[in-house]
């Protein structure tokens, strides 16, 4: 075993690709994604205004809209056509349209209409601006109605009771800041590490066949494939777990993201994710005993993991067939552990099935050991 470990460490240090995929690429992604979403939510998104009325009332509406954190009024346009073209050019994400006579109709209680247009091609920007523009429209309507009630002799309490009969208090749990980085980075970073583990594991086995060194590798392991795999992958397991510990320390220690159950359950999940990812990489190479096919399958499976794990779109809202398939992705189970342990702070008993699922992934190589053994010893690489 020791000579297998020494041999693998020599192979790793002799190839810069290992160092890049195992250290440089993960560290770059850690810094890139956390810096990219450093502000938590996008702010000061550019919005245009078409104010055909141009009165003190409409100018006050525009000033109040500009005061929203996500909205910044950057341009005024003379008509809808000009604003629409600006949105198509990507200069603004939305525009607010106030038709002529809005103030006059408001004072005469003739129910004026204002409109706003958002660019749905940009999901996050469009959603945030839709919320701000709709809120501003409702606030403007309420303010006008409040003044009318005051003019009719209503008290402030009577007016507010009529305008807003039910007061809503919103309390977002576990992420009260609505910080997108908390939602995304805790799954994107381990997902990227998982994808890199897939690739490195398959490459390290496939390169033995490609370079015709598999017989030397197996001879050192006394023709025991289990020992050969253990000696090859153990150094990688240590390095990848160090990288997993690094992003956990960075997220929960330096950035102070919520971690309500403590760091130990998350570190345990990270270690299991590393082992499950390596095992899944072995399984893929045994299933497709050709380096390029196995790498392609691993890349496809890793990329799909980001969509089907549930952190961007809930699995329970997917088609039933996709809900069933989601359990075949290690990242899905890691995400469930993160939600239960780090965000919700539930006892470990709530996450036992996710931990067991990762352990089951670690057993996958047992199903292809004979096929993998034949591939390592008898397969001849064809460029």
Image (spheres, rainbow, N blue to C red):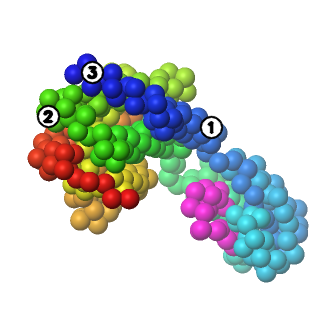
> Mark 3–mark 1 contact, CB under 8 Å?
no
- Assign a secondary structure to mark 3: helix
* Nearest to viewer (mark 3 / mark 1): 3
Q: CA distance from mark 2 to mark 1?
A: 48 Å
Give whichever of 1, 237 is nearer the camera: 1
Q: Residue at x 25, y 18 (%)?
A: 2
Question: Judging from the image, what secondary structure is the residue with disc 1 in?
Answer: helix
Residue 74 x, y percent position in the rendering: 82, 58
Other residues around mark 3 within 10 Å, as few (<14) / some (14–19) / many (≥20): few
Determine crowd level at label 2: few under 14, some 14-19, many 20+ residues with C-alpha closer than 10 A.
Answer: some
The picture quadrant where one finds residue 187 is top left
Front in this rendered view, residue 347 or 23: 23
- Name the residue: 25% across, 34% down: 216
Question: Could you say which quadrant of the image residue 271 lies in?
Answer: top left
Residue 274 is situated, as x and y percent measured from the top left of the image, at 32, 34
Separation of marks 2 and 3 at Cα, in angstroms: 14 Å
Residue located beneath label 1 in the image: 35
Residue 19 x %, y %: 49, 32
The span picked out in magenta is: 115-133
23 on left or right of 232: right
- Distance of mark 3 from mark 1, alpha carbons? 42 Å
Label 1: how many Cα within 10 Å (few below 14, some 14–19, many 20+): few
Is 132 in the magenta? yes
Per the image, the residue denoted by label 3 is 3
Work out whether 245 lies above or below 123. Answer: above
Between 79 and 363, the one lying in front of the other is: 363
Name the quadrant of the C terminus.
bottom left
* Residue 380 figure quarter: bottom left
Q: Name the residue beneath numbered marker 2.
A: 223
Cβ atoms under marks 2 and 3 closer than 8 Å: no
Counting the numbered discs, the total is: 3
Q: Is residue 308 magenta?
A: no
């Amino acid at each position: 075993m020791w000579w297998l470990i020494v041999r693998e460490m020599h192979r790793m240090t002799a190839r810069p690709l290992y160092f890049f995929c195992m250290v440089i690429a993960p560290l770059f992604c850690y810094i890139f994604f956390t810096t990219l979403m450093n502000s938590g939510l996008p702010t000061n998104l550019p919005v245009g205004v078409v104010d055909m009325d141009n009165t003190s009332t409409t100018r006050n509406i525009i000033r109040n809209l500009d005061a929203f954190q996500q909205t910044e009024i950057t341009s005024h346009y003379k008509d809808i056509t000009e604003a629409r073209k600006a949105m198509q050019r990507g200069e603004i994400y939305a525009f607010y349209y106030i038709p002529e006579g809005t103030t006059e109709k408001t004072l005469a209680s003739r129910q004026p209409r204002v409109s706003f247009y958002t660019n749905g091609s940009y999901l996050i920007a469009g959603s945030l601006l839709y919320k701000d523009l709709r809120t501003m429209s409702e606030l403007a309507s309420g303010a006008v109605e409040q003044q009318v009630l005051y003019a009719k002799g209503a008290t402030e309490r009577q007016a507010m009771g009529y305008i807003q009969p039910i007061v809503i208090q919103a309390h977002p749990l576990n992420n009260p800041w609505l910080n997108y980085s908390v939602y995304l980075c805790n799954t994107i970073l381990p997902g990227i590490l998982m994808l890199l583990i897939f690739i490195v594991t398959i490459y390290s086995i496939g390169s033995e066949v490609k370079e015709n060194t598999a017989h030397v590798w197996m001879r050192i392991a006394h023709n025991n494939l289990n020992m050969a795999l253990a000696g090859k992958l153990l150094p990688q397991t240590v390095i990848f777990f160090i990288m997993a510990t690094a992003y956990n320390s960075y997220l929960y220690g330096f950035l102070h993201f919520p971690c309500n159950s403590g760091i130990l359950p998350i570190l345990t999940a990270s270690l299991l994710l590393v082992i499950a990812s390596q095992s899944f990489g072995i399984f893929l190479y045994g299933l497709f005993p050709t380096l390029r096919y196995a790498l392609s399958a691993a890349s496809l499976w890793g990329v799909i993991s980001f969509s089907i794990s549930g952190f961007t779109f809930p699995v329970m809202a997917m088609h039933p067939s996709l809900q069933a398939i989601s359990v075949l992705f290690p990242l899905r189970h890691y995400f469930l552990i993160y939600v239960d342990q780090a965000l919700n702070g539930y006892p470990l008993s709530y996450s036992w099935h996710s931990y067991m699922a990762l352990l089951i992934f670690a057993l996958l190589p047992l199903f292809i050991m004979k096929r993998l053994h034949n591939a390592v010893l008898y397969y001849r690489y064809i460029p």
